Image (cartoon, rainbow, N blue to C red):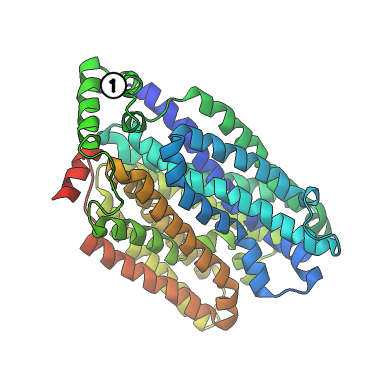
Amino acid sequence: MKNKTYNSTYIFGITLVATLGGLLFGYDTAVISGAEKAIQAYLILPLEMGSFAHGATVSSALIGCILGGIISGFLSNRLGRKKTLLVAGFLFFTSALGSAWPEFLFFEKGNPTSGLLVAFNFYRIWGGIGVGLASAVCPTYIGEIAPAGIRGRLVSFNQFAIIFGMLVVYFVNWGIANGQTIAWINDTGWRYMFASEAIPAGLFFVLLFLVPESPRYLALVHNEQKALSVLEKINVTKEQAKNILQEITSTIAETAKTKIFSYGKKIIITGILLSVFQQFVGINVVLYYAPRIFESMGVARDASMLQTIVMGFVNVVFTVLAIITVDKWGRKPLLVTGSIGMAVGMAAIAVLSWYGIISILTLIFIIIFSASFMMSWGPVCWVYISELFPNKIRGQAVAVAVAAQWAANYLISSTYPGMMEFSSSFTYGFYGAMAILSALFVWKMVPETKGKSLEEIEKFWKK
């Protein structure tokens, strides 16, 4: 066995803190799954609003996610990766409390219910900005800290944290709702679901003060001494740290200012399409509306939330599989295999829906679809986003890719209730078709980056 050339304890410690941002990403986006029916009863139905308003409210955080993704490049380049994550932590904390008690902010005095709906959506968008920032900067930060040989694994830990955050909130939602009346959940229980996020958000904010800034960002702002200090803590020898710093500075020093298309349009289009396909396969419809989907199969509310927890466990297991294999098998094989599995799962659900068959088979194919995503597009898309772009344009390019991802997420999630009213079999068939197209896209356009340093990947795009 070869001697390790990096300080495992230090790197994994940094990664653990950074992935709390991923956990909050998952927690914030999935907390709505247990509360969305209560929100509908408490805020939507009293105003006699329909499925569009319901879908828009459930998905309102995604508007903030888009905004957070758009500004993530600017903030991470101006403030640094670490300070941008601190901003995200603050947004998570304040949004958790505000979403739970929107009474603290009224926009409309004449109609209290209408004012509450506006205030609730404001706080969800506010927290969504934090999610957008964390979704862009956490994998970027980990990718810039991590040695090439374990970068895929470490960035995949961020996806594990996202899924683990979802699993945790499924448990929290179930624990809050278990044994309670529907009336209590609709009036009070949903508030506790949102407020619970303040605990991990506060922990994330405090622990961020213990981690260093990214050495690649420090080099980008010409603070080579601090960059070297961080690299010396990461790597076993000072000589190795100096060599890595020299490689980083050589890619940065070539031009004073670099435009986003300096390496051609293909790299930006590839990043955008990776992000869009990750959402167009329909994964977040399953995650956001899981209890409602299971209830539509004839399962009681408490049992549907338990089945959501079972699905959460499956997601964690298959994300771990991706973590184990991404640096061994490579990125492309995992993506293509996952796309095929998702296509099979969604096609089967579409057929069952067409014939009106509601059975354990539906749950099995939902799990096949979800597991296929979690072992492939879930973590690997974020790995690609963190490593695909050259140092000089990484902040801008990641911001574009992440904004595109959240825009696609919002489009898919907000249109789901309306699409289901039109035709459930068409809805699931559409997601299955997107899975097939995603496999063709990866096979034709996406390069393999396994085992390459960020600077070696940059040289590939120069060619």
Q: Is residue 405 visible?
A: yes
Q: Position of residue 131 (x, y in %)?
A: 54, 47
Q: Residue furthest front?
A: 256
Q: Residue furthest top?
A: 238
Q: Position of residue 377 (x, y in %)?
A: 37, 55
The quadrant in which the N terminus is found is: top left
Q: Quadrant of residue 45?
A: bottom right
Check disc 1 and report its element: helix, strand or loop: loop
Q: Quadrant of residue 113?
A: bottom right
Q: Nearer the viewer, residue 19 or 436?
A: 19
Say what amino acid the circle numbered 1 marks: Asn
Q: Residue furthest left?
A: 463
Q: Is residue 162 visible?
A: no
Instruction: Please name the residue shown 34% across and 46% down the image.
Output: 383
Q: Position of residue 60 (x, y in %)?
A: 61, 60
Q: Residue furthest right?
A: 110
Determine whether, in the image, residue 51 is placed left or right of residue 208: right
Compared to 139, does 102 lie above or below? below
Instruction: Please name the residue shown 44% across and 62% down the image.
Output: 279
Dot 1 corresponds to which residue? Answer: 235
Determine whether, in the image, residue 134 is placed left or right of residue 266: right
Q: Position of residue 262 (x, y in %)?
A: 24, 51
